[in-house]
Image (cartoon, coloured by chain):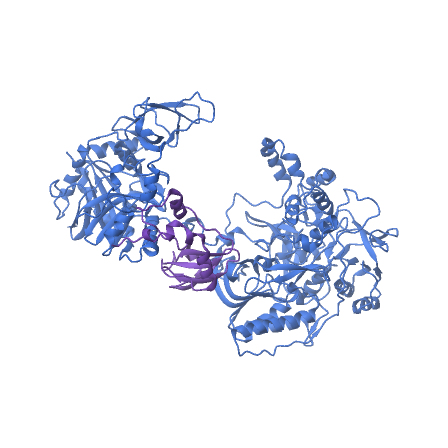
Amino acid sequence: MLNIDCPYCGLRNETEFSCGGEAHITRPVSNNLLSKKEWSEYLFSRHNPKGVFLERWVHTSGCRKWFNIVRNTMTNEIYETYKIGTKPKSLTGKEAYKNNWRRHTKAETNKVEKNNVKK
Amino acid sequence: MSKNRVENHSSYNKSIFFYFDNKKLHGYQGETLASALIANRVKLVGRSFKYHRPRGIMALGTEEPNALVTIKKGNEVEPNIQATQIEIYEGLNTYSQNRWPSLRYDFGSILSLFSKLLPAGFYYKTFMWPSSMWKTYEHFIRKMSGLGRASNKVNDTNKYEHINFYVDVLVVGGGITGLISATIAAKSGLKVLIADENPLLGGSLLCEDDIKINSLSSKEWASQIVNDLHKMENVTILTRGTVFGYHDHNYITIAEKCLIKETKYSNLHPDQRLWMIRAKKVILAQGLIERPLTIQGNDLPGVMLSASARGYVNKFGVIPGHNVVIFTNNDDAYRTAVTLFKAGANIKFIVDLRNEISGEMQKKVKKLGIKILFNHVLTSISGKKEVQNVNISKLSLDRKSLVEKNIPVKVDLVCLSGGWNPTVNLFSQSGGKLKWDNTFSFFKPDIHVQDEITVGGSNGNFDLENSISETILLTNKIVKKFKKKFSSNFNVKIDSPKLSNKIEKFWQIPLNKKFKDKDKAFIDFQNDVTSNDIFLASSEGYQSIEHLKRYSTLGMGTDQGKTSNVTGIGLLSENIQKEIPDIGTTTFRMPHTPITFGVIGGRDIKDLFDPIRLTKIDPWQRKNKARFEHVGQWMRAWYFPKNNETMQETVNREVLNTRLNAGILDASTLGKIDIKGKDSRAFLNMIYTNDFSKLKRGSCKYGIMLKEDGMVMDDGVTSCLEEDHFHMTTTTGGAANVMSWMEEWLQTEWPNLEVFLTSVTEQWSVISISGPKSRQILNELKCNINFSNKSFPFMTFKEGKIEQIPVRIFRISFTGELSFEINVPSRFGLFIWEKILKIGSKYELMPYGTETMHVLRAEKGFIIAGQETDGSVNPIDLGMNWIVSKKKNDFIGKKSLSISSSLKNRKQLVGILTDNPSKVLPEGAHAVKNINQRAPFEMLGHVTSSYYSPNCKRSIALALIKNGHSMYGETLNFPLLNKEIITAKIVKPCFFDPNGDKLNGI
């Protein structure tokens, strides 16, 4: 049973939360020039490391806010939790963010396709 | 006084009578069933798992592998409880297990004669071939083997509770080191919980008579320190609490057997309680567990672990035997000799397999006149149903064979001590790594992963003085982390027997003659695993300890191999010439000791397992004898039978009447989400495939939402309340999902959008009234809304009042009829429902349920998300190209939809008409073109909805068929499980009123 530090509510039991999988996946707009393969990297491919992982959680039975966690999938150690829209501050988290293969995918490097609903 | 009791023991208080196998026996309050059975000279307590061999009590605590009994309370049965863990009480009713017709004359024990035929892996080797016969064999095998039987007739009436708890320091184990740790932590002011599985704290302090602490006897000291702990408000003492699980982030689970004091409220108290504890620091002080030695016949009743035998005398005042041989590889067993001697037993020999040593203990027993045989071993233990004889031989110089003839000795108790294992189960569960200690031949904690420390015996200490000084040191250290200024002056003066460090590894007693199969030397007593089984398994190639465990079932019993695992590993190591550290241990998992399922379930069972949601109109529906169905957590009226109607007759009547007159449906369960904020419209345009840019105030629009993979997720109608305020409806089952899914997009992807989502499903009661007469009925309601076609057209909504009650009425239709959905604040739902029905009675208005709703919509070919769709269907497959906006730059699923809709051979939604109009296809039936093909058939698709339509006077169905949109008019075959083949034609998915004339109620 993980003990998760919700950035809005503080330490709570894992049962109050739901895991939303990998964090920091930027959505490209639909009218993009990505190939099927590049699009599928955004849509289906998920990082599954044995070690430090940046993932998204939501405080389902609490404030219902989404936030990010830096967690070691092997030991379940949580290095930090941080709000959506910010980047990890811990060294471990920074490293994991930088080294994620996704940072080099077309979907994320192609700055033109950056998602922005509001005009 | 029984011959097996010492005189005037301090534990003799209140006399109690209890039953074992229907025999009335005497005992004292506070003692265990095992202790009372020993006092009553009951040696044979059970039959073993596989060979049905006679078994007795071997240990004092939870490590007991043999003495499992069943407790009966009225008709209730609780099987497989260790006799060492049952506190006796007046009228306790216990039974032995796995025997027939009786414990003494067990039919199954003839299996023992055939045991040559039952080696390790026997079942795998024999009964798995031919595999089709396993189902036949299994029935008989399950009957023969096994332990006690649970009752499948009577419900468990015990009450269980859960409690969440938070502490600074959790101490596991109430022995001397646990008590010291708890006291130091508690004195510093920290919040402490100390848990122990026994009714009294004290652990081995209560089992010894040769330890003095601060000049007090160990029992006196224990009761003093426990008293002091009781007085402190920051300390919680949990006795009868089995710590069975060590989970992530210092989360500990404890199953407490509650002591119920008889009061008028006692029936309200829980019988067991599950403690779920988050501790900042955990101190594991679980002590050591003794190992037996591997000798033929070591499982007979009357063979005990040496320290356990001593414990029974000192703790409960019962004497397990009177003519004793003690066989040991370490000094601790000498203490047993002294205790038993003082209790009046005749110690025939101490058989010590080590080379001669002369330490404090040896001198002490020699002074008492007890004979020690160094360099000797027990070669066999024998007797009929209990220990009667042992044979002793001398070891050769190389210690691998025997040099002398047997010395036979008559005994009734054999005490074995084959060394000690630190209790590391919880430490291992926490993720900690073990290391092998060659001096003491045991695994002890090495690398700590979570925030815990191990102290005392469970940290690998054999010497009491070292153990205590280490405990004080380690505990002070962690307290200082909490309280920087804390300085502890805790100290104790210990006077205990000095034990030699010399513990000799000896996994298997050598034999001169060749080992015969019937000479069983047991390793795992509960699962009947012998040393032979280990040899066999390893010679067959099962050399990894994890493989060996599964093949031989070593350590897989409910005792988790507490007494057997290390011996098994040792034997394997000897056998395959591999060092023990290289073999390692098996994985430790919870529960550390058996617990009931009931305590895990707690109160979350039956009605409280999952809540049921009811609408405000539910009471009327119940009163009017509706049949109900579960839709998600909701209970929805399914149909309203009249008199003795069948379901089909009811549905036919309801369907016909709705199209002829009018019908009324409780649609309150529909998901409803209030969307507000200046960017609501932009957000809706991302969520739905169609364009919401121009939806006017007062208008409604049907929409489909896709997941990012382009497949249909949910559908519903969204209405524009204000320029920046919308009312969205979803399917009943999808409501929660849609809500959290939209919230996720808003928070994680578009935090810049100003949109607020509020679930209002339960705030509104929804009454759907449908049929040509619905307008007439509404006109009679005292409502300030004009219901005429002109002023209230299709796909609009109006706000108004019915007798001061605010309402929102939507003119939308799921039936194809003129239809109004009346939304009223929930608390008025039932009132308006009854009012409409009263007016409706003269217009033949009838209530209908979900089944009729399904038939009506299927007649029109309207889909239900989740029935026609399954996560692999896109809107183009459904023939709904019109709902996908071509203008919009972006919406969720757009890119994927453009990819999937360009693929060929997709399954598409079509209507199905059976050639025989009275034949209704089963939902899920598969379609094939040609029934004369060779298997596997080419599957073209399947039926998603199928009903008898009374309006069309025939069966109708919807199906997803590969390339269905280009197959109208073609005939397909639907082969059913019962070998019947139904033929049917593919048609457009609309069976009634294809032009939509009825929508306006003409």
Is B541 displayed left or right of A98 in the figure? right
The quarter of the rendered structure image containing the N terminus of chain B is bottom right
Q: Residue furthest right?
A: B404
Residue B894 appears in which quarter of the rendering?
top left
Tell me where residue B148 appears, x and y as whole percent.
61, 46
Q: How many marks?
A: 0
Residue B995 appears in which quarter of the rendering?
top left
Tell me where residue A33 appears, x and y as whole percent.
33, 45
Between B75 and B191, which is closer to the camera in this rendering?
Answer: B191
The quarter of the rendered structure image containing the C terminus of chain B is top left
Above/below status of B862 relative to B147 = above
- Chain purple in the figure, letter: A
Tell me where residue B803 appears, x and y as whole percent.
15, 51
Above/below status of B646 relative to B271 = above
Is B744 displayed left or right of B798 in the figure? right
Between B129 and A70, which is closer to the camera in this rendering?
Answer: A70
Residue B145 appears in which quarter of the rendering?
top right
Tell me where residue B510 appears, x and y as whole percent.
81, 50
Q: Residue furthest top?
A: B932
Q: Would residue B29 be visible to someone looking at this image?
A: no
- Chain blue in the figure, letter: B
Q: Would residue B962 be visible to someone looking at this image?
A: yes
